[in-house]
Image: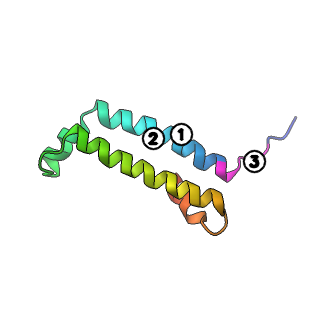
């Protein structure tokens, strides 16, 4: 029986980004998260446009964190772990 190689941590980080971003955005968008947040969190005029802007900024932060992690995997290990969590 051939032994499988261990998954690299970087592949886990990339996989988390690739799975989380589309699935989470679809889930929130299709289930009406902006309206829910406006009702229960009392965010005034929380429209789909504002929600999209917040998500674009969040994705940008994740990608910047990945860029730091990719540059120096030891020094910025916390960024890689944060993306997975």
* Viewer-side residue, 48 vs 40: 48
Classify mark 2: helix, strand or loop: helix
Tell which residue pokes out farthest to the right in this image: 1
User: Marks 2 and 3, how far apart in space?
Assistant: 24 Å
Residue visible at 53% across and 52% down? Answer: 84
User: Marks 1 and 3, how far apart in space?
Assistant: 19 Å
* Viewer-side residue, 71 vs 78: 71
**Mark 2 vs mark 3: which is more N-terminal?**
3
In this picture, which residue range is highlighted in magenta? 5-10
Classify mark 3: helix, strand or loop: loop
Q: Is residue 75 above or below residue 55?
A: below
- Residue 76 placement (x, y as % from top left): 59, 66
Task: Give residue 6's mark.
Answer: 3
Q: According to the image, label 1 marks what residue?
A: 18
Please indicate whether residue 81 sits to the left or right of residue 4 in the image.
Answer: left
Residue visible at 23% across and 38% down? Answer: 48
- Name the dominant secondary structure of the magenta segment: loop
Q: Residues within 10 Å of mark 3 (few under 14, many from 20)?
A: few
Residue 85 seen anywhere in this rendered image of the structure: no
Q: According to the image, label 2 marks what residue?
A: 21
Q: Residues within 10 Å of mark 1 (few under 14, many from 20)?
A: few
Residue visible at 11% across and 49% down? Answer: 44
Q: Check contact, mark 1 vs mark 2: CB within 8 A.
A: yes
């Amino acid at each position: 029986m051939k032994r499988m190689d261990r998954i690299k941590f970087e592949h886990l980080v990339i996989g988390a980004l690739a799975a989380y971003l589309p699935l989470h955005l679809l889930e929130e968008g299709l289930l009406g998260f902006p309206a829910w947040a406006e009702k229960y969190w009392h965010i005034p005029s929380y429209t789909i446009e504002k929600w999209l802007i917040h998500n674009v900024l969040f994705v940008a932060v994740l990608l910047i964190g990945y860029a730091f992690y990719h540059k120096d995997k030891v020094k910025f290990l916390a960024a890689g772990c944060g993306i997975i969590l």
